[in-house]
Image: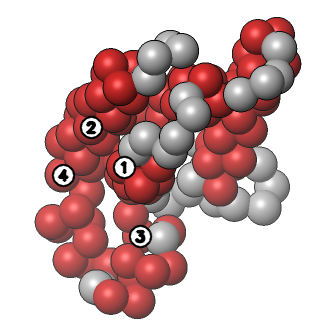
Amino acid sequence: MTSLPFTRLLRSLGVSAAVFVLFGAVTGLLPNPVYVRMVARTPADYLFLVATAAFAGAFVYQRSLASESIGDRFAAGGIVGGVLAFGCPICNAVLLALFSSSALMTYVEPLRPVLGAVSVVFFAGVLIYQRRRCEAC
């Protein structure tokens, strides 16, 4: 709460960039030699990646202004929902261990855009709620 506005801005931009690069690399949206994506990349995947990264940075910025913790768990849920929305469902080891690849492609793959939209709305709601509850924001 005592850091300068420029430091807060740099930190939030750093979080956004880190989320974009890290999640983009491990989901195969950013091509790399370590990870091969097994489903086609779509513009919606990139949209949800950018939205998740932007919301994470905005949350970190607003959180640095608040004197008490407001919505941390909901923000984490929004990030998880965002990753599930743009991540490759059959490349996710946890989902693959719980379900078969055919079940994931049949039931989860068509729901990814809906999950992404819900995640964006959820994260926007958290930011609005945090903004209204924070006097310094």
Q: How far apart are marks 1 and 3 (CA)?
A: 26 Å
- On residue 90, which mark appears? 3
Is residue 129 something that shows in the picture?
yes
Residue wearing tag 4: 111
Looking at the rendered structure, the kind of residue marked 2 is Phe
Q: Dot 4 lies on which element? A: helix
The disc, 4 or 1, on the residue closer to the chain's N-terminal end is 1
In this view, 57 is above or below 92: above
Residue type indicated by callout 3: Ile
User: Which of 19 and 12 lies nearest the eye of the viewer?
Assistant: 12
Secondary structure beneath label 1 = helix
Asked whether disc 2 touches disc 1, contact meaning CB atoms under 8 Å apart, the reply is yes
N-term-proximal mark, 3 vs 4 = 3
Disc 4 residue type (three-letter): Leu
Q: Which residue is drawn at 38% across and 77% down?
A: 95
Coordinates of residue 77 in the picture (x, y in percent): 38, 54
* Residue located beneath label 1 in the image: 74
For residue 62, what is the image quadrant?
A: top right
Comparing labels 4 and 1, the label whose residue is closer to the camera = 1
- For marks 1 and 3, the one nearer the N-term is 1
Q: Nearer the viewer, residue 37 or 85?
A: 85
The residue that label 2 is drawn on is 122
Crowding at dot 4, Cα within 10 Å, few <14 / some 14-19 / many 20+, comes out as few
In screen coordinates, is 71 left or right of 120? right
Q: Which of 59 and 42 is in front in this view?
A: 59
- Amino acid type of the residue that numbered disc 1 sits on in the rendered structure: Phe
Secondary structure at numbered mark 2: helix
Q: How far apart are marks 2 and 3 (CA)?
A: 25 Å
Q: Are marks 4 and 1 in contact (CB under 8 Å)?
A: no
Residue 100 screen position, x and y as percent:
29, 85
